[in-house]
Amino acid sequence: MTTSILTYIAGWPIIAALVLLVVPRNYRVIIRAIAVLATLISAVLAVKMFCQFVPGANGFQFEQQIPWVDSLGISYHVGVDGLNVGLILMGAIVAFAATLCSFEIQTREKEFYILLLVMSGGILGAFASLDLFFFYFLHELALIPTFIMIGVWGRGEKKNYATFQITLYLSLGALIALVGLIALYVASGANTFDIPKIIEHAKTNPLATNVQNFIFPLLLFGFGILVSLWPFHSWAPLGYGVAPSPTAMLHAGVLKKFGLYGLIRIALPVLPAALTTPILSPSFFNHFPFGWLPAFTQHWLLNLTWPYVLALLCVGNILYVGWVAMRQRDLNMLIGNSSVAHMGFIFLGIASLSLIGISGAILIMVAHGFLAALTFALSGYIYKQTGSLEMSELGGLCRKLPFIGTALLMAAMAGCGLPGFANFAGEVTVFFGAWKVFPAITFIALWGALVIGGIYMTRAIRNVLHGPLPEKWNTMADASHVWRKLPYALLLASLLVFGFWPRLLTDKINPDADKIVERVTAPAKAMDKVLVQADNSGVRN
Amino acid sequence: MKYEILPWLILFLPLLSAAVITLFTLRCKTTSSLISIGAIVAGFVMTVVFINANGFHPAVSETMTNWLNFGGPLQIDFGLKLDALSLMMLLIVTGVGGAIHIYSYGYMDEDPSKARFFAFLSLFTFSMLGIVLANNFVMMFIFWELVGVSSYLLIGFWYEKPSAGDAAKKAFITNRLGDFGFLAGILMVWGLLGSLNFGVLKGAMETNPAALGCCATIAGLLVFCGAVGKSAQFPLHVWLPDAMEGPTPVSALIHAATMVAAGVYMLCRTLFLYTPDALHVIAYIGGFTALLAALIAVQQNDIKRIIAYSTLSQLGYMVMAVGLAGPTPAMFHLTTHAFFKALLFLSAGSVILGMHHEQDIWQMGNLRKKMPITFVTFLIGALALSGLWPLSGFFSKDSILGQAYGQHNYLLFIIGVFIAGLTTFYTFRLFFVVFFGQEKSKAASHAHESSLVITLPLIVLAVFSAIGGLIGIEGIYHYNFPIEGEQSAGFIAALFEPFKASPVAALLGLLAFAIGLVAAWALYAKAATDPLPAKLGGMATAMKNKFYFDELYEATFIRAHDGIAAVVNWIDQWILEGCGIGLVRGGTNLSGRMLRHLQTGNLQTYAFLFVLGVSLVLYFVLRK
């Protein structure tokens, strides 16, 4: 079997990291060149892969499988379908942009680049993996460097506390997800770590409903913590606030999408019954004294399903965190909170369990990857120049920084859902998908997207870019060099391309998202069929 | 349909122009402005060519391509609708817009960021054309938002002025409030009817008027929210006067001729959605806005703000007309208003230039001799706005009043007539104070006429403001909204048509004009200060302070959001973060402390545990 292009996409950064180990630390230019080159190759390959991808082809493309531990059924297995093709493209481009933005790192550059490359390679590999073991392992490989980078190269007084918090939360999330995945492996009985095989196996031998109901929350909350699902989100703004910007770009942009991807790739198709059956069994009331509750509350509790819970939680992300973002005085904290709020739209799309919603969710995942990377890169540039992101101290920067200012303005507008940027296409799709399932929650989400998002973004622009320029920032310099401008231009262009032609992505996503939706709704339909048959037989008798 | 490519070119040329200016020619002022002017003038020419080839009513009225596709349930097209309504709007946007572009070339000549200004203007033109041409709800919403953002950019063009930055922010957020309702309405309509295309929706509503069921009124009003925001109707009218912080051509283009008209246009485009109840609400909101704004305008002193409130008031007229089931009068007034209001704004801009950026009318005076061309054009604009026969404003305003009278809604009819009087009063208050009386400041005595590139667009617009009512504009809209009965043909017949069709409305309108004019002359022809506050007392203060709407919103909407934000932020910091971190850390800490007792390093303890363990094992093994 030939080596898949995916192996190269994820492999180049890892190889470059290994090469960097032996490069002397004072060869700064070479270190940087190697890192930039490796991520560039990986990005170009990703673009090539994206262009060659055939929408709607059956099964996975660019597949490669090498058996590893036969007794457990672990193999190196990579491949793409509509669900991850966009993510890998986004990840590779963001990794390249993040490497370009690393010029701001001045101390211990060698270690920084090595960690950055490991992180890039790890997360690209995790997205490409079709084997549970590698899927999880490569994610951890990417996650650990995050902690180190924030701890060592982070900025500000709260550095230690933020590192502590992000490490704690993310390790906990990863741990819960791990428990869920192991439980899944054991319970599926397929005796393989191969994701497609597990899904196939689950189709013919579905897991018992109560087992599904046990595993699903583990995956939901485990992955959810990794994605800053409300109320487990407080690590994110703080962590991104102090992280060096390349780390924040990669984590907020790419790594964070892992949890969402995991939910869509694994939890939805393997555990369909957990999504459609109520969480609480009617016997619940026999064990617990809730009989005094009003009837409609009891009814509501009995009909509670996991997607509904998820939709309720995402109101927390969209509305609650939106309000928190309104309150922030520090630009990075504002961006971090808004990034958490955006996760709410993705969760809403997933919770709708409809083709439109899930396609929209993946579209936002890709769009938000570019956007988060862009905003953190820009705030990093401003921080480098001013040493502060306190919005009351900034102002009028558009005059001194026309390029950076314009890019930040566009990013802010993309962040509050302006058409033309990919985020709008994704968000509006999610709204359409969720409207029929959760009209009230969609209504609230609209308020969060249009009004609250608009308020905090325009406030940020007003405080940072508009108004008179304080005397002390007169010495600021704009990004003038092509290489300095490139990462921002690249990310903006990506946002615009997918904003103008979202079909580039949705046509690839749709067939595979459709399979997932079919898989989730099939048991319900089958059950309907059984009921109908029972009815018919009843009539006949 | 012939020349199907033309509408696409008309739409995308301004975008191209904006992109080219931003990417390449930002350093060169002249090239940038010529690119931008070229794009919109070419658009105008192409519109004329297209209409010549296809008429105002092409047989096939749509051309589209797919933008997003999710199979059956959701198909979002990127399509252009070409019928009388949109073609006429195309003419207005490219024609009036083109005149304003040319005017801007002169007006912005000394600004260092002229290139950026023209890039924004082109972006705005693109967005506005998109609204006009949209054939479905989502596409309209897309351009709706783009218009919002380009107006944000243009209002905040002089972003270093804090007031400009604040005004831009306010306009954006207020518009967003309307957009919130608009998108919710779109989702609701889509959820119930399963389509987004205007043509399909119209067909569905015609075959089954009850298709929207019990939600019909709510859905209609939600969509109307969009118009409330964009057309600055009560209660979202607060942004428009502040938007005067932008350069004057922006006020003329966005806040008179095009953007604010988008709401009225959208209402006419989606007229099939509204139930009688919804129309009722729309009519009264329009009437109330018209009255409120006219009252406020009486006591403003900034030349642009007076015209801005007048715009609000006229938009109220149009919305009222839509609500009275009269899309044709509404669109007719929209068209003539685009002419004379752009003319008034641009003339005001010429005055401002002549006065070296002084905008307080009580600093001006006696300018008619210093600025003769501006004086004449302003007079024509003012008369057209006030509705003097036979200028354009008379015909369109009369058709609205006639509509109210014809629908037997006498309350709105009387309000309409009263506003007509008020309009004349505040317009000529402004006119007399600025152009008559004594010079009230040094700047006024040194004022000078503007250059040709500025006065030429004024003259063109003045011509159209004068004859706009007689060139058959109303008839074109009848393609879209056919009416019963025949129309009189011929120039002379058109001239006297209003007096024949609805004599009460026409005569009362003229009477209101006369009263307003006389009152303004009596009070302001020679006044050096405003005599009105002394006469009206508290009412005048309230009018001057815009009836305290800004303060009201500051105290409610903004306070509420900031208050919630503060509370939520506190919860986030101290409870969620504290709990999450505290529990995990506390738990780990506690278990560590407990386990520490197992590893004391004390040999006796280890020996004791060892013996304990052995005895336990022995117990379990030997128990059998």
Image (spheres, rainbow, N blue to C red):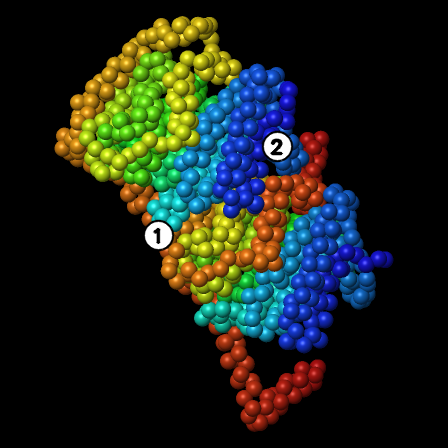
Amino acid type assigned to the residue bearing label 1 in the image? Gly
**Chain of the residue displaying label 2:** B
Within 10 Å of the Cα at label 1, are there few (<14), some (14-19), or many (20+) other Cα atoms? some
Image location of residue A524, percent across then percent down: 66, 42
Q: Quadrant of the C terminus of chain A?
A: top right
Q: Examine the rendered structure and indicate whether residue A394 appears above or below residue B147.
A: below
Q: What element does badge 2 sit on?
A: strand
Is residue B446 among what the camera can see? yes
Which residue is at the far bottom? B604
Using the numbered discs, state the Cα–Cα distance from disc 1 to disc 2 in whole angstroms: 41 Å
Image location of residue B376, percent across then percent down: 32, 23
Nearer-the-camera pick, B336 or A246: B336
Nearer-the-camera pick, B131 or B178: B131
Amino acid type assigned to the residue bearing label 2 in the image? Asp
Mark 1 or mark 2: name the one nearer the start of the chain. 2
The residue labelled by disc 2 is: B77
Contact between marks 1 and 2 (CB within 8 A): the answer is no
Circle on res. B563: 1
